[in-house]
Image (cartoon, grey):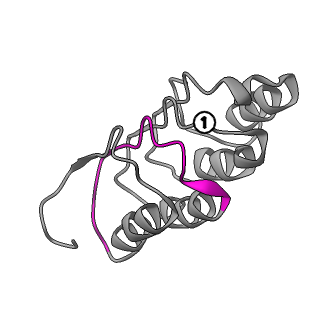
Amino acid sequence: WAGSGVKALGLCDADVREAGVSAVAAAIREGCEISALDLSGNARIGDLGWRSLSRSLQASTTLVTLTLRGCDLTPQAVPHITHVMRTCQSLRECDLGGNRKLGAAAAVAQICESMVVGGSQVARL
């Protein structure tokens, strides 16, 4: 993937699971310079998949937009999401809409806190 010229990766409703998102994470670690990643509608990625992705995205210098709409995210995914929001300095937009399980007050508060206190550069959530 590195040097492939791929700038946007849209995997919306593609039934991506842990192994698939781990492959995406590996490509990012290997130097794929994507600016937009859309994983919307992939509800079976799982905690290990989110962890793998967050570790890769923390070092990204090109990712601007991360779309996780309708991924059935739970409060257990919040630490991974906030980690990306705090460490990926190029990230400006993170779409978490349609994740009803994420609506718990504590989860929302943690996400908002990472934007205000954590040094996040995200301008649109």
Q: Quadrant of residue 85?
A: top right
Q: Position of residue 124 (x, y in %)?
A: 50, 23
Instruction: Characterize the local packing of mark 1: few (<14), some (14-19) or many (20 or more) Cα atoms within 10 angstroms.
Output: many
| In this picture, residue 122 sits left or right of residue 118 | left
What secondary structure is the magenta-colored segment mainly? loop
Q: Residue 2, image x and y in percent?
A: 22, 73
Q: Is residue 93 above or below residue 118?
A: above
Q: Which residues are magenta?
A: 31-47
Task: Indicate left or right for 94 with 65 as reference.
Answer: right
User: Residue shown at 77%/48% (left/top)?
Assistant: 76
| Residue at figure coordinates x 56%, y 67% from the top left | 52
Rendering coords of residue 107 (x, y %): 80, 32
The structure residue drawn at horizontal position 61% and vertical position 27%, both measured from the top left corner, is 99
Query: Along the line of sight, which residue is nearer the eye, 53 or 123?
Result: 53
Q: Is residue 44 magenta?
A: yes
Q: Residue flagged by tag 1: what amino acid is it?
A: Asp
Q: Nearer the viewer, residue 62 or 5?
A: 5
Q: Is residue 73 above or below residue 96?
A: below
Residue 81, x across and y down, in percent: 63, 46
The residue tagged 1 is 72
Residue at disc 1, secondary structure: loop
Determine the residue positioned at 74% across, 50% down: 79
